[in-house]
Image (tube, coloured by chain):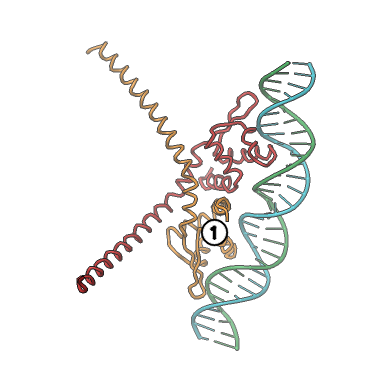
Chain colours: A red, B orange, C cyan, D green
Amino acid sequence: MPMTDVIDGVFAALANSTRRALLARLLEEGDQPVQRLAAHFDMARPSVSEHLKVLKDAGLVSGRRRGRQQIYRLEHEAMASIRDWLAPYELFWRDKLAAMSAVLDEEARAEEEEQTRVEREEPE
Amino acid sequence: MPMTDVIDGVFAALANSTRRALLARLLEEGDQPVQRLAAHFDMARPSVSEHLKVLKDAGLVSGRRRGRQQIYRLEHEAMASIRDWLAPYELFWRDKLAAMSAVLDEEARAEEEEQTRVEREEPE
DNA sequence: TTGATGCGTAGGCAGCTCCCTACGTATCAT
DNA sequence: ATGATACGTAGGGAGCTGCCTACGCATCAA
């Protein structure tokens, strides 16, 4: 599977607030079964199951059986793929902001020098 | 506008390979007009315009006029909102991996100690 | 074995996405 | 003013999303 399709799936999965909320629950409360996850949402349980399937297909969560329950947990790799995708943009902006702050520092320095000169010309 | 809607828009905008490719062009080649962006895609120019609108609505790009051209450029804030959303998960996994590597280190140390003991018992 | 529980899937419907072509509008060259 | 250029929007169609209820299957308690 091409990398672009993986990223497609991950971003698409995250483009829904219910699914992001499911991830947040798993993050804050740890692994848990569907029932417990579904309890927090004003939505039929099967709909939650479908959301979990989307997250699972995207690689953002995994499920294991425990008796008749299915325990879901966060998976790291898919998240990491987003971070990796984001990295070049972060670098770009880091450099951009660094350059900008260098300019501002230079302006501040020049202004301070100007201020010093003025102060020398207007003593007391 | 609630933060969740902003994030929704950004993730939805990024859940399309054409739009991600447009961002990549802007990243690598800098600000440019629609025409030049559209040239790289096997797609009608108006479709590219629509993708750019999605990116613009999500806050990922901005446009300024130059004569009859519209120059698009990357915008930082929307990207930053993703990074911020991602941060708690990154922290979670950093801790998780740190704990895991501590366990592995401990196992390695124990194993090494065992090895040392064996070596003492079998000198030369 | 029987009934209850936990979960997933089937089927259906309203609304959105992504592409297209046709057209409207602003700007520029002549 | 006239035609060309750069761009956006309108309108439409095929397919996907997100929700629902109904149902099927596996597991557990009694």
Residue D24 point in image, percent of width and height: 75, 30
Residue at point 46%, 46% (across, down):
A83
Q: Does residue B50 lie above or below C11 as drawn?
A: below
Residue at point 63%, 38% (across, down):
A40
Q: Does residue B46 lie above or below B68 as drawn?
A: above
Q: Which residue is mark 1?
A: B55
Q: SS for tag 1?
A: helix
Left or right of B100 in this view: D16: right
Quadrant for residue A42, please give it: top right
Left or right of B123 in this view: A99: right
Q: Residue furthest top?
A: B121
Left or right of B24 in this view: B49: right
Instruction: Name the amino acid type tagged 1.
Output: Leu
Residue neighbourhood size for the residue with mark 1, other residues' Cα within 10 Å, grouped as few (<14), some (14–19), many (≥20): many
Which chain letter goes with mark 1?
Answer: B
Q: Does residue B45 lie above or below B13 as drawn?
A: below
In this rendered view, identify the residue nearer to me: B46 or A39: A39
